[in-house]
Amino acid sequence: MAQADFWHGARTLVTGATGFIGGHLTRRLTGLGAVVHAVSRRPPRLSEGGEVWHTADLADPEATLALVRRVRPDYVFHLASTVTGARDPAIVRATLDGNLGAAVNLLTAATEVPMRRLVLAGSVEEPREGDPTPQSPYAAAKWAATGYARLFHSLWGVPVTVLRVAMVYGPDQPDTSKLVPYVTLRLLRGEDPAVSSGTRLVDWVYVDDVVEAFLRAAEVEAAAGRVLDVGGGRQVTVRETVELLARIAGGPGRPRFGAVADRPLDRPQVSDIGPTAEVLGWRPEVDLAEGLRRTVAWYADHL
């Protein structure tokens, strides 16, 4: 079956639809003919693609259940998240509610309102076997949400798939403090971006490839109950990434390595995309150089 035939008329719910991946996924689903219900704490004033917008705090179990009952989606893509790499006790509660609480509320709603697939966005930063200590409050909350997803699938048959997503980059990233948009915008303005030592290893994946993985996780029956990695499958240092951006962007700006302190407890993870290829038939198609060229071109057009 062609992908457009699969999605035409399908009722979908995308949480975190004003976010980076959520925004790209919402536009893709709309283009495929799906009936898209998009949810965010602060929806945009106008719908650009015909999607139906809802306002809801998914950390509230009653609000989450009411939303799912109202929409009755065939497919749910849970991308709403409190994303931060900070190592600060003050953000523990926010990451717990925004990542674990919201996921558990959706999983619970799925036991009452039948759906064909619930796809949760996990993180490559989640601990793996032999490395049991989370490196941040965010990683701990995502790890716990993955555990609950396994539980809900095993005990109550919730058709959930978790995609542990690596470091996503690409055009139109709302949080311009993230490395790629921050460095790109500074360079395009002829300024010197301040970055860390550059020794950190990162597994990068282009946003369009991530969107494709989410679609396939919903389309493939064998994905139910699985936890799969979505990334490039290779590590590149921050220095290499920034230097490549500088070559693509051109201009007088020069990165200032070491101007920002490295984060503690940064243990680089790399995606194991072999099982993802086996189950979903998915591999990343856009390599880092091409993805960064597309990204720089987009920001150059939107300065």
Image (cartoon, rainbow, N blue to C red):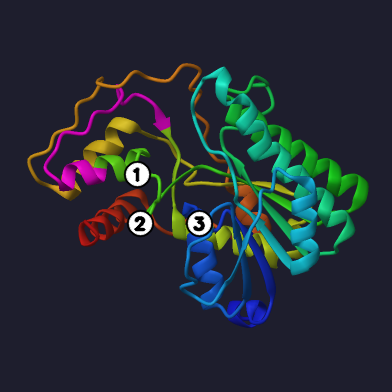
Find the distance from the CA under tag 2 to the CA under tag 3: 14 Å
Find the distance from the CA under tag 3 to the CA under tag 1: 14 Å
Picture coordinates of residue 220 (x, y %)?
71, 65
Upstream in the sequence, badge 1 or badge 2?
A: 2
| Residue furthest left in the image | 252
- Residue picked out by circle 2: 171
Magenta residue check for 43: no
Upstream in the sequence, badge 2 or badge 3?
A: 3
Position of the N terminus by quadrant: bottom right
What amino acid type is highlighted by mark number 1?
Thr
At x 51%, y 23%, the residue is 267
Dot 2 falls on a residue whose secondary structure is loop
Residue count near mark 1 (Cα–Cα under 10 Å), binned few <14, some 14–19, many ≥20: few
Q: Assess whether mark 3 and mark 2 are in contact (beta carbons under 8 angstroms).
A: no
Q: Is residue 218 left or right of residue 172?
A: right
Q: Does the rendering let one see residue 135?
A: yes
Q: Is residue 213 left or right of residue 69?
A: left
Q: Does the rendering let one see residue 73?
A: no
Picture coordinates of residue 180 (x, y %)?
33, 43
In this rendering, which labeled residue sits more in front, label 2 or label 3? 3
Q: Which residues are magenta?
A: 184-201
Position of the C terminus by quadrant: bottom left
Dot 3 falls on a residue whose secondary structure is loop
At x 37%, y 19%, the residue is 262
Picture coordinates of residue 11 (x, y %)?
70, 73
At x 46%, y 73%, the residue is 48
What amino acid type is highlighted by mark number 2?
Pro
What amino acid type is highlighted by mark number 3?
Thr
Name the disc covering residue 176, or none. 1
- Residue picked out by circle 3: 18
